[in-house]
Image: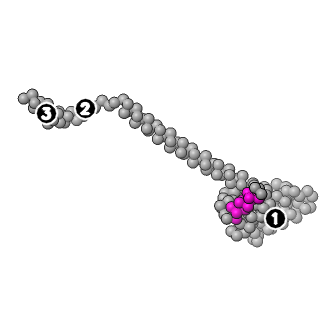
Amino acid sequence: MPKLLFSRIRLYEFKDLMPNMKRPRRIDIVLNCRRKKDIQCVSVQKCNDEMYSSKLSCQTDHKLHLEKLLKDKKYLAAFRSFLQSEFSEENIEFWLACEEFRLTTSPEDLQWRAEKIYREFIQPTACREINVDQHIREKIKQALEKPSLSCFDEAQKHVYLLMERDSCPRFLHSNAYLSLNRKSRTLWYL
């Protein structure tokens, strides 16, 4: 009879009698599971932070590159030809015209240059019309009555941001930029 008491069958029957009873867990297993979850949470958060910082650095990189493109004559010429190949050279032409407009000193020159820029880039029937909002157009049209050096600032900023977000990243991945960049590096080493 004692053999029957400790047989496997009896142990299984005994376990089945207490199905709802919680078994004590080992504390090291519990802590280890919590540690894994914490590590996963930290790694996910770190990954998200890295993605955000890479997006942020990517945006600042494009901003720095656009500034570099607009200051260096070689890169500016390559960027201009790239925009011509994409049929959007009016953006860079408008930006350059506004920069030249800011250098104007005499009021007479200011008036006719402002009208010329308006007719060429802002007017709805312009041959090289840029993509700006209607309220910006209206502000510029009102400012033409008595133009100032800052009458095109809002439109110029809008076009700059458009080039920074759209044209510049594509140009930085184009063969024209990459070959020009390679050439400038090799000339530096010579």
Residue type beneath disc 2? Met
Q: Position of residue 17 (x, y in %)?
A: 18, 34
Seen in the picture, residue 72 relative to 6 is either above or below; the reply is below
Left or right: 178, with 43 as reference point: right
Q: Position of residue 137 (x, y in %)?
A: 75, 61
Q: Which residue is mark 3?
A: 7
Closest to the camera, between mark 3 and mark 1, is 3
Q: Residues within 10 Å of mark 2 (few under 14, many from 20)?
A: few
Residue 55, magenta (yes or no)? no
| Spatial separation of the CA atoms under disc 2 and disc 3 | 22 Å
Residue at 44% over, 38% down: 37
Q: Quadrant of the N terminus?
A: top left
Q: Quadrant of the C terminus?
A: bottom right
Q: Which residue is mark 1?
A: 117
Q: Which residue is mark 2?
A: 21
| Spatial separation of the CA atoms under disc 1 and disc 2 | 84 Å
- Mark earlier in primary sequence (2, 3): 3
